[in-house]
Image (cartoon, grey):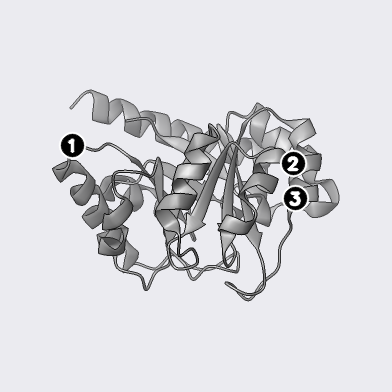
Amino acid sequence: MHYILSPSILAADFSKLGEEIEKADMAGAEYIHIDVMDGIFVPSISFGMPVIQSIRKVTQKFFDVHLMIQEPERYIEEFIACGADGITIHQEACKPLRKTLELIRAKGLRAGVSISPKTPADQLLPVLDLADMFLIMTVEPGFGGQKYMDSCTEKIRELREMLGSRGLHTDIQVDGGITRDNLHIVLEAGANVIVTGSSVFRGDITDNTVYFQKRLEAFEQSQTNR
């Protein structure tokens, strides 16, 4: 299994967003995580298509677009057009879930499904065979800088067991409160795509990115050698 760092630009300095993304890119981050919030599904409003389109010019890294919006099926084509490489939608916010995932994949993108902390992992069963990635929110969606919710660790483990019992090796992404101190917890539970915002963009972006990359590479190597 491959282990991937996806720095969340929600924690970046927006006055120099392009420059900060370039630093994470040059330091080795494979994904750039982009949280889109609508003020309806979650209380906050972040940014939309124009910002994604503008930052697409500064990096060729994988744009990992997380739609924290109600009825995301309305905007799939627009997010594809502005440069998304993968689109993750919330199980709680999208009624035509399978149809929307099928559309994303038909367009050649990676399709993800996210669940909030209060949503049980078994709610993903109807699309377990269809998504390219599952995102477990480890904080309440909508705000950066929250503390990791320990109760989510078991959910990560449960989802990895659900996938494994079906012979699936689908990516599990975690987002929320991931730090240097608790990274090992989510990795050991079964996550392999790590979103972190403040722990990358607060302080020295290059040093922070390199640190997480090395930790992920070391863990991947340890799993390979088992």
Is residue 39 at least partly visible in the picture?
yes
Q: Residue at x 29, y 49 (%)?
A: 128
Q: Which residue is mark 3?
A: 49
Q: Earlier in the sequence, mark 3 or mark 1?
A: 3
Where is residue 209, by image quadrant?
Answer: top right
Q: Secondary structure at mark 1?
A: loop
Is residue 135 toward the left or the right of residue 33 in the image? Answer: left
Q: Secondary structure at mark 2?
A: helix
* Front residue of 195 and 216: 195
Q: Residue furthest top?
A: 225
Q: Residue furthest left?
A: 165
The residues tagged by marks 2 and 3 sit, at their Cα atoms, a distance apart of 19 Å
**Disc ID at residue 167:** 1
Q: Residue furthest right?
A: 15
Mark 2 packing: few (<14 Cα in 10 Å), some, or many (20+)? many
Where does residue 192 sit, x and y in percent of width and height? 37, 41
